[in-house]
Image (cartoon, coloured by chain):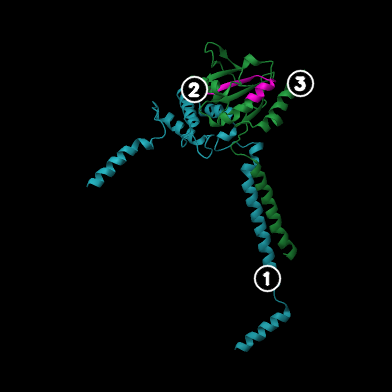
Chain colours: A cyan, B green
């Protein structure tokens, strides 16, 4: 009973620790959805494999604040994304735009997949051909003789 | 498949891998290319560290080649860079303007008093807003701006003595000659 009580009280204490991201009050639920979507799409530049929503870095906090202020100030999603990209480059986007410099990034995997499939087709075709011509007439006679002996 | 191609294919695949991984080794993912290169320097208007009544802005230095160095007293790498900046200041080829990023003015002043002050002036960016406008994400960062107010170079992280002599000083000299 006492341990249970202890565990419960510890769990109570740990609640604020989970609230890494500061709470924001939105008057409009749609705005909150947009805020969440934006901070999930934007990359934190300090801890590069986290987005703004996950990161506890100082800069991420500032950029969340900036996103929030712009949203509440009536900026569109595109305006906020442009604001970030004009300062930090395409790198802030988890989904980089499709343009000449990012072309290999977008089509590279498909090109590699295509090459792989092509290679596979060539290998399989070649194997089928060699299998078809695997036995010469002499060999076929030998096989027949061997099979006859079994009977 | 002939025996020859059977040997050649893995070697080719290996060679391609080596080339790609080799290129990967020379890249630093922490160094994100700045979108400001060859673009006008972002504006700010901030109080000077030593005299809060004086306001500093990039426009004050138009017509000159100058450097903007983002620093803070809490930044350990800035301490490593400080001697290099002092060396650059001694060269006396271009003014170094500090952007004191998210720092306490008293800490910043103490820091400069203890270590020496290579800056012609430092602008106080208490809330980091100017830092965001300049795309700062890792202090220290250094920008080289030309006479027309165009950002020509950005260095992320502390400048080492080699980088100062091999890159920064030659660049500043070339930019200054371009005008003449």
Q: Count the labels in the image.
A: 3
In the rendered image, which quarter is residue A96 located in? top right
Evaluate whether label 1 is on the same chain as label 3. Answer: no
Horizontal arrangement in the rendering, residue B101 relative to residue B8 (left or right)? left
Of labels 2 and 3, earlier in sequence is 2
Who's the residue at 55% across and 25% down the image? Answer: B131
Which chain hosts label 1?
Answer: A
In the rendered image, which quarter is residue A133 located in? bottom right
Percent coordinates x, y for residue A142 in the rendering: 69, 83
Which chain hosts label 2?
Answer: B
- Which numbered tag is attached to residue B177? 3
Who's the residue at 69% across and 48% down the image? Answer: B19
B39 to A45, vertically: above or below:
above
Which range is magenta?
B86-103
Percent coordinates x, y for residue A68 in the rendering: 46, 27
- Residue B34 visible? The answer is no
Mark 3: secondary structure: helix
A30 to A127, vertically: above or below:
above
Which chain hosts label 3?
Answer: B
Percent coordinates x, y for residue B58 in the rendering: 61, 17
B107 to B157, vertically: above or below:
above
Discs 2/1, front:
2
Discs 1/3, front:
3
According to the picture, the residue beneath numbered tag 1 turns out to be A131
Mark 1: secondary structure: helix
């Amino acid at each position: 009973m006492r341990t249970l009580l202890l565990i419960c009280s510890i769990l109570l204490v740990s609640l604020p620790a989970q609230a890494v991201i500061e709470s924001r009050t939105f008057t409009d639920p749609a705005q909150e959805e947009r805020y969440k979507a934006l901070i999930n799409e934007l990359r934190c530049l300090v801890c590069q494999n986290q987005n703004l929503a996950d990161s506890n870095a100082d800069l991420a906090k500032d950029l969340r604040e900036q996103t929030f202020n712009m949203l509440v100030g009536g900026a569109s999603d595109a305006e906020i994304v442009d604001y970030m990209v004009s300062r930090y480059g395409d790198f802030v986007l988890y989904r980089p735009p499709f343009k000449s410099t990012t072309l290999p990034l977008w089509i590279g995997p498909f090109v590699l997949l295509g090459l792989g499939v092509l290679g596979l087709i060539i290998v399989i075709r070649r194997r089928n051909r060699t299998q078809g011509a695997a036995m010469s007439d002499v060999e076929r006679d030998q096989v027949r003789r061997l099979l006859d002996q079994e009977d | 498949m002939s025996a020859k191609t059977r040997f050649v294919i893995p070697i080719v695949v290996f060679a391609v891998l080596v080339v790609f991984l080799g290129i990967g080794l020379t890249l630093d993912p922490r160094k994100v290319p700045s979108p400001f290169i060859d673009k006008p320097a972002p504006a700010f208007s901030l109080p000077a560290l030593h005299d809060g009544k004086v306001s500093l802005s990039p426009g004050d230095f138009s017509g000159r080649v100058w450097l903007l160095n983002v620093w803070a007293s809490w930044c350990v790498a800035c301490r490593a860079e400080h001697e290099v900046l002092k060396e650059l200041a001694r060269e006396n080829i271009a003014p170094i303007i500090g952007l004191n990023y998210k720092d306490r003015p008293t800490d910043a002043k103490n820091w400069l008093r203890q270590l020496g002050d290579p800056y012609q002036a430092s602008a106080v960016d208490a809330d980091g807003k100017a830092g965001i406008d300049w795309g700062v994400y890792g202090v220290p960062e250094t920008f080289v701006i030309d006479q027309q107010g165009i950002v020509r170079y950005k260095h992320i992280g502390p400048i080492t003595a080699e980088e100062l002599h091999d890159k920064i000083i030659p660049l500043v000299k070339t930019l200054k000659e371009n005008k003449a």
